[in-house]
Amino acid sequence: MRRKKMMAIRWCPLLFCFMLFRFEYCIAQSAPAVYVFGDSLVDVGNNNHLPISIAKSDFPHNGIDFPTKKATGRFSNGKNAADFLAVKLGIPTSPPYLSLKSKFKKVNASAFVSGVSFASGGAGIFNGTDNVLSQSLPLTKQVEYYSLVYQEIVKQLGAAAAQTHLSKSVFAVVIGSNDVFGYHDSNSKARKASSPQQYSQQMVTLLQTHINRIHSLGARKFVITGIGPVGCCPSERNKNKDACNEDANSLAQMYNEAVKSMLQNLSSTLQPFYYSYFDTYKVLNSFIQNPADHGFKEVRAACCGLGNLNADLPCLPIATYCPNRKDHVFWDLYHPTEAAASLFVDYIYDGPQTYTFPINVKQLVAI
């Protein structure tokens, strides 16, 4: 009996060391921070701090399934893709840049080292996509803010340590849908000036400029998402006799193909440059075409709104909302439910090359 106890005593430190090694290994394989650029799909509250913006969601029924049960500025009934990505990486959700800036009255490096979100509802690759929505932070402004963050991080950590930190961090770019909506707007000047092929290429050319800029400021690991079949969101169906707007979907696909080609080129021209591209179109289309396979029942109507497909009115306080939110793909006119966003990130983080390539985010952070 005594011999067994002695063996147990000898094994305990070894087991502890093994567990500690496994823990340290897991931490090493994660990312120290996430820097988020994008639109309302990943906005975690930046637009709350834009005083004249009407592109806001800081009111009920938004946030009904968030842990606080209150609206946070997320265009969702609960958490969005930015939240779920942070969970996968084992770090807190990156806070909105404007909340930190207003809190500290200046760019605060210690706050930004752990990650920050520049995403803004209504934002696009082009600066003018928020004209109808009054105010947002277009990608140009988001990258400008990141350049200020970069400068302050370098001041705090020093150039070498800052580069090490940023090279291990994840830079997520989720944008483009509003540019597609803008092109197909009835008052669109872009549609008169450019063909869909020209317009999509212009989007990608400008996106590449911004990626080059972010890369020059320390970023090495990028997560880039394509545009989904936005022509099938409740708003577009409502304008098209409940059918998808295939012109909008076609433009999204043109853009996606051009983005994939651009990223492949950057992987050889920018060194080092690592990326994971998420095929949003293919995954969301799978939700729509085979809802039961993914746990959904309703793919056409919004959960929150009023009128046909709950799409005659946005998710305002006077709107009604469905009790079975996990059954719905769409929360409101344009945005996915928390349930759909969670599934998206499952594919983004650990999905096969069919949806996430050339590597997924789990593989990306391990580089």
Image (tube, rainbow, N blue to C red):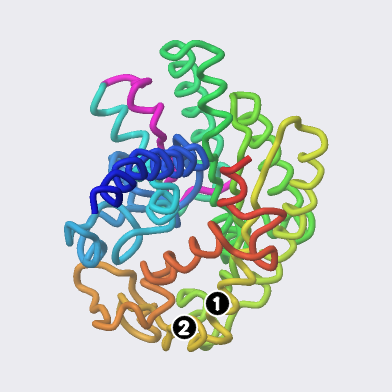
Residue hosting label 1? 232
- Front residue of 95/12: it is 12
- Residue 7 % position (x, y): 33, 46
Q: Are marks 1 and 2 in contact (CB under 8 Å)?
A: yes
- Residue 212 % position (x, y): 68, 32
Magenta includes 261? no
Horizontal arrangement in the rendering, residue 256 relative to residue 47 (left or right): right
| Quadrant hosting residue 267 | top right
Which span is picked out in magenta?
105-126
Q: Earlier in the sequence, mark 1 or mark 2?
A: 1
Residue at image x 60%, y 77%?
A: 285
Say which mark, if any, is on residue 321. none
Magenta includes 125? yes
Residue at image x 69%, y 57%?
A: 357
Question: Circle 2 sits in a helix, a strand or a loop, which is it?
Answer: strand
Q: Quadrant of the C terminus?
A: top right
Q: Is residue 346 above or below residue 146?
A: below
